[in-house]
Amino acid sequence: MNISHTTLPGVFIIEPDVYRDERGWFLETYQADKYHDGGMFLSFVQDNCSSSVRGTLRGLHAQLSRPQGKLVRVTRGEIFDVAIDIRRGSPTFASWESVMLTADNFKQMYIPPGFAHGFCVLSDIAEVEYKCTDVYVPGDEITIAWNDAQIGIHWPNDSPILSPKDVAGQTLQILWDRLPDYQI
């Protein structure tokens, strides 16, 4: 397994070992000791799965009082996956990291608590699975505008399909007083 650090502290790209033969392939999607060895000390309490059509953009989402770390992977299709540092006072505040996650490349991205997450679907259909370090708490979530100019994400689609919640996303400037503080 190869674990790569990104420009954002705590955000990792994981490339698991894939064992292929004439029958197909096998991989471990998560093994605690290997992730610990790579610097990720994770305890997952909830797994989620979504299916979306081409052009769908989900995000940018984060929870405030119960922030979630997310280990994201694609089981079908292809997405442009994004993590954004939303911690006030962080040296990388409003910075983002992206990776192409596909069912064929088997890559994963770990997004730690204190970061927002979103993705855009590039294939006809994408199925995304992610493990979470805390449970979903209705009312604790914020939605940041996918096109917030302060963040400046270079999305592969400039007119995505959005949910009503994502259409109503707010800028970091408007959400400033609600954002988490950077912890050293």
Image (cartoon, rainbow, N blue to C red):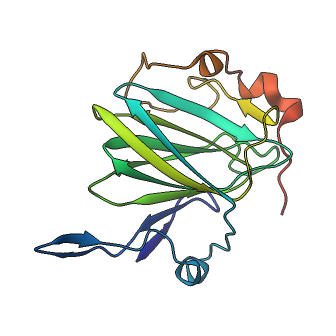
Q: Nearer the viewer, residue 96 or 31?
A: 31
Whole-percent x and y of residue 88? 81, 43
Q: Where residue 86 sits in the image (x, y, percent)?
A: 72, 42
In the displayed structure, would residue 165 be above or below residue 139? above
Where the N terminus falls, by quadrant? Answer: bottom left
Residue found at x 57% / y 26%: 146
Q: Residue at x 64, y 28 (%)?
A: 150
Position of the C terminus, as image quadrant, is: bottom right
Horizontal placement of 145 versus 135: left or right? left
Residue drawn at x 82%, y 47% as measured from the top left? 89
* Residue 35 percent coordinates (x, y): 56, 76
Q: Give the vertical position of 117 relative to 14 (above or below).
A: above
- Compared across the picture, whether 112 is left or right of 161 comes to right
Q: Residue furthest front?
A: 23
> For residue 65, what is the image quadrant?
top right
Q: Is residue 36 left or right of residue 87?
A: left
Q: Nearer the viewer, residue 73 or 111?
A: 73
Question: In the rendering, at what x and y percent does residue 73 appear?
Answer: 44, 54
Residue 152 makes an appearance in the image = no
Based on the displayed image, in which of its 4 quarters is residue 28 positioned?
Answer: bottom left
Say above or below: 125 vs 16: above
Asked if residue 157 shows in the view, the reply is yes
Residue occupying the far right of the picture = 177
